[in-house]
Image: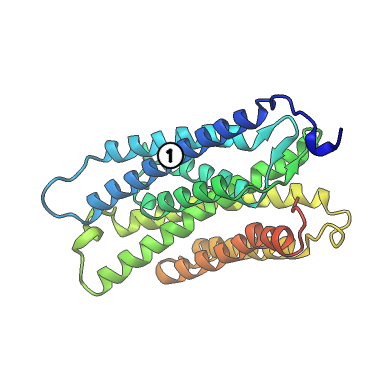
Amino acid sequence: MSADTTTRGPQPPSFEIHEVTHMTHTLIAYVATFCYLASAALIGIRLFRKEGWIPERPLALAVGFAGLLLHSWLLWDSIFSTAGINLGFYHALALTSWTIIALMLISSLNKPVDNLGLILLPAAALSLIFETHFADVGFMRPTASWSLKLHVLLSMLAYSLLTLAAVQSILLAVQDHHLRNRHPGGFVRTLPPLQTMESLLFEMISAGFVLLTFALLSGFAFLENMFAQHLVHKTVLSVLAWLVFGGLLIGRFRNGWRGRTAIVWTLGGFVMLILAYFGSKAVLQFILQRSAG
């Protein structure tokens, strides 16, 4: 009997199970996306609306936390497996956005930083869409050393805190511009005082700088052959970002740097950091067809 006329038995249900799992993952991703966007919208209404219905701050935070819980389930489902931790580009992006939103929402419980969600929550929603529709693989094996896992954790936390600082500096720039031009109305009236905004900025930078320092120190242990691992650009840009943030903190301590100077230095360091973390990963994974470690 020829191969074309061979009778095929019933197909195993693995494909159907995979499809159902994928549909469930997609549905939860869209619900989480909706929660993030709804939370950002509620924050925006609080900032920009002068009359009519203005939502209470706890409502915006509650909706954001709902999105964070769903985001947590998605990450557990797609990143962590018996094969290791999948840190492909889009998965790493979703994990980083989760860390940023978690830090922002938890900090918002006792500090006025929820306004950062106006920018960060839509960005996190976009990362979920990418993670859901663009599958990629970049496993960190379960046998990876604890020091490597610690390095990844410290790097993630440092990047997340300094991302919060960068967004805080953008809000600070807008607030400073309005006050200089004597337009204190609009959403600026809902922001904390300028001095409080600056204090929050430097608290974020200080904590992020400490974490970045430990991340770099732990990372140097894995640079036995920097060129073979394609880590030159990532290492150089990370060190430059560290120097920028360190220089800013020294300038703040010795010369009282603030305002536009602090904003420019913060954004400059952040650009270097984002190129180090995601720029090098994108080049390795998408251009050189390698999985960045």
Of all residues, the one furthest to the left in this rendering is: 52
Residue visible at 80% across and 61% down?
230
Of all residues, the one furthest to the front in this rendering is: 1
Which quadrant of the figure has residue 5? Answer: top right
Residue visible at 37% across and 40% down?
35
Front position in the image: 187 or 49: 49
Residue 112 showing in the rendered view: no
Residue 256, image x, y percentages: 45, 65
In this rendering, position of residue 206 left or right of residue 241: left
> Is 59 drawn above or below residue 168 in the view shown?
above
Residue 282, image x, y percentages: 67, 60
For label 1, the residue is 32
Which quadrant of the figure has residue 78? Answer: top right
> Is 127 drawn above or below residue 9 in the view shown?
below
Q: How many marks?
A: 1
In this rendering, position of residue 76 left or right of residue 139: left
Front position in the image: 5 or 59: 5
Residue 199, image x, y percentages: 41, 54
Residue visible at 69% across and 41% down?
86
Residue 24, image x, y percentages: 50, 33
Disc 1 marks a residue whose amino acid type is: Ala
Front position in the image: 70 or 188: 70
Q: What quarter of the picture does the N terminus occupy? A: top right
Residue visible at 23% across and 51% down?
45
Residue 240 showing in the rendered view: yes
> Is 35 drawn above or below residue 20 in the view shown?
below
SS class of the residue under badge 1? helix
Front position in the image: 47 or 86: 86
> Is 96 drawn above or below residue 79 in the view shown?
below
